[in-house]
Image: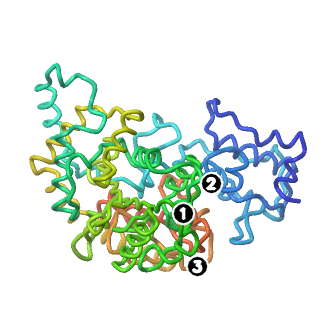
């Protein structure tokens, strides 16, 4: 009997109902419903349950919500992942509702933008879980300098500064970004081509509202960044999952799958999550495809500044001569995510269209924050901060990898990567990376299972762990011992 067949019974179907307005998080509600179905015999040992993707579509929930519930069920032994054979209720399990284990009371990490996370109740803890993705080295940010810049901007506030902020972004900040991109990323653009956004999600929504319509097909990397897929699907677009190899997105495969796609979203500097760089032939291929088909390429340059094997590579946008690439940058990775500030560089021919969209859908980013960042950049602090972080990250990356391998070398190996802000640990032995990641989250550590980032492409199991806030090799060894105890 299948999962959906079991739930067709009117009495048991209600077990999966969740209340979006309830005080309990949705993943906890779903966890309790499925656990109850197992302990009460509605689902029996060996019954197959749907993939997180299928159940998310069936229930109208985010895939991450389903994955979190499945992770808890798997970690507690209620269900088992069988690879391509799917996930089933654990064979041989015999439980009654009276013996069901209670749901853990510790906050569980939930995926947010750029692989970051927050506890399900943000007020429960201010601790940063080890290995949390998407976070720069918060201990190394020049907070005193930042405070002085803020105080100076506040003291200088005049009545015009208290008016509604510009819909397109503070001119001084847009000019500073254009100047920085010319030097650091090889992008020649005018101030008018730069638009300030409130983060990656706002950037993507801005692009979709301006250039795409529901039903359009959009290439994305597989494995690839989970929120990109979710944003496309929520907008009524159809993601086309294009595999990646050692040279990045396999552009010819994208053409074979959907040559008439309207757009492609790529991470050329460091592929998310595998971190290889898009090769020059592939860069030229995707630019030629976009020009020939009137398609758009969104370059997500989320951490292009951090390359350790050589100097940072020029941006894909720097090669664009036909106005088909939109460059998405962010301050979350080079400063701190709480700033909620990002930017988009659009082709000169599309400036008017994007201005018209912004006049309707404006995020209203506070002027004070933009002024502080503009001053931070104009006075040279931004460039110096990136240089310091590049050196610090190279050291912490080496220390974290060495410390983890001293403890976990028999179980895992660090995959070689030229840059980025996280490590990829490949599992040497057969096992579920999703289950291990769930257990790590239960025990106060952060982890992404690589399998969760793939949709159609088969990937070897592995863990994605950030090293930016691991200060010493000793700390990495301590954390490695905790992971070893969970394997």
Q: Position of residue 429 (x, y in %)?
A: 58, 79
Q: Residues within 10 Å of mark 3 (few under 14, many from 20)?
A: few
Q: Tell me how far mark 3 sits from mark 1, CA to CA.
A: 20 Å
Q: Position of residue 5 (x, y in %)?
A: 87, 53
The residue wearing badge 3 is 429
Which colour scheme appears in the figure?
A: rainbow
Query: Which label belongs to residue 453?
Result: 1
Relative to 31, is 36 on the left or the right? right
Q: Are marks 3 and 1 in contact (CB under 8 Å)?
A: no
Tally of numbered discs: 3
Check the image and report above or below for 150 versus 484: above
Q: Position of residue 251 (x, y in %)?
A: 47, 74
Task: Give the residue at x 38% y 59%.
Answer: 300
The residue wearing badge 2 is 67
Task: Give the residue at x 74% y 57%.
Answer: 78
Q: Are marks 1 and 2 in contact (CB under 8 Å)?
A: no
């Amino acid at each position: 009997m299948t999962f959906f067949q079991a739930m067709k019974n009117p009495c048991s179907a209600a077990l999966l109902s969740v209340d979006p307005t309830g005080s309990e998080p949705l993943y906890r509600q779903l966890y309790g419903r499925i656990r109850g179905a197992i302990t009460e015999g509605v689902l029996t040992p060996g019954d197959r349950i749907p993939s997180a993707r299928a159940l998310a579509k069936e229930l109208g929930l985010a895939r991450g919500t389903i994955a979190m519930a499945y992770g808890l069920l798997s970690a507690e032994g209620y269900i088992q992942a069988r690879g391509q054979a799917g996930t089933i209720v654990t064979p041989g399990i015999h439980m009654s509702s009276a013996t069901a284990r209670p749901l853990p009371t510790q906050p569980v990490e939930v995926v947010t933008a750029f692989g970051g996370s927050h506890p399900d109740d943000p007020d429960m803890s201010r601790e940063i879980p080890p290995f949390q993705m998407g976070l720069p080295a918060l201990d190394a940010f020049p907070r005193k300098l930042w405070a002085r810049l803020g105080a100076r901007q506040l003291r200088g506030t005049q009545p015009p500064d208290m008016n509604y902020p510009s819909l397109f972004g503070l001119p001084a900040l847009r000019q500073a970004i254009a100047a920085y991109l010319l030097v650091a990323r090889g992008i020649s653009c005018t101030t008018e081509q730069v638009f300030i956004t409130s983060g990656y999600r706002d950037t993507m929504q801005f692009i979709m509202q301006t250039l795409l319509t529901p039903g359009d097909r959009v290439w994305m990397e597989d494995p690839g960044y989970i929120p990109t897929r979710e944003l496309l699907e929520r907008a009524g677009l159809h993601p086309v999952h294009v595999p990646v190899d050692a040279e990045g997105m396999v552009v010819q495969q994208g053409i074979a799958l959907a040559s008439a796609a309207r757009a492609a979203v790529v991470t050329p500097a460091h592929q998310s999550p595998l971190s290889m760089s898009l090769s020059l032939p592939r860069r030229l291929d995707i630019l030629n495809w976009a020009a020939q088909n009137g398609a758009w390429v969104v370059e997500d340059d989320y951490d292009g500044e951090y390359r350790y094997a050589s100097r940072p590579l020029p941006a894909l946008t720097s090669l664009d001569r036909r106005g088909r690439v939109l460059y998405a940058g962010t301050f979350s990775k080079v400063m701190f995510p709480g700033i909620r500030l990002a930017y988009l560089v659009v082709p000169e021919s599309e400036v008017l269209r994007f201005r018209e969209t912004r006049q309707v859908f404006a995020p209203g980013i506070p002027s004070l924050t933009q002024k502080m960042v503009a001053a931070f950049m104009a006075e040279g602090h931004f460039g110096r901060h990136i240089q310091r972080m590049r050196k610090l990250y190279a050291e912490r990356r080496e220390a974290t990898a060495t410390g983890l391998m001293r403890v976990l070398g028999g179980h895992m190996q660090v995959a070689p990567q030229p840059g980025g802000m996280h490590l990829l640990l490949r599992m040497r032995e057969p096992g579920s990376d999703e289950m291990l990641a769930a257990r790590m989250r239960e025990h106060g550590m952060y982890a992404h299972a690589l399998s969760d980032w793939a949709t159609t492409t088969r990937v070897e199991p592995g863990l994605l762990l950030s090293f930016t806030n691991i200060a010493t090799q000793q700390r990495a060894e301590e954390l490695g011992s905790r992971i070893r105890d969970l394997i």
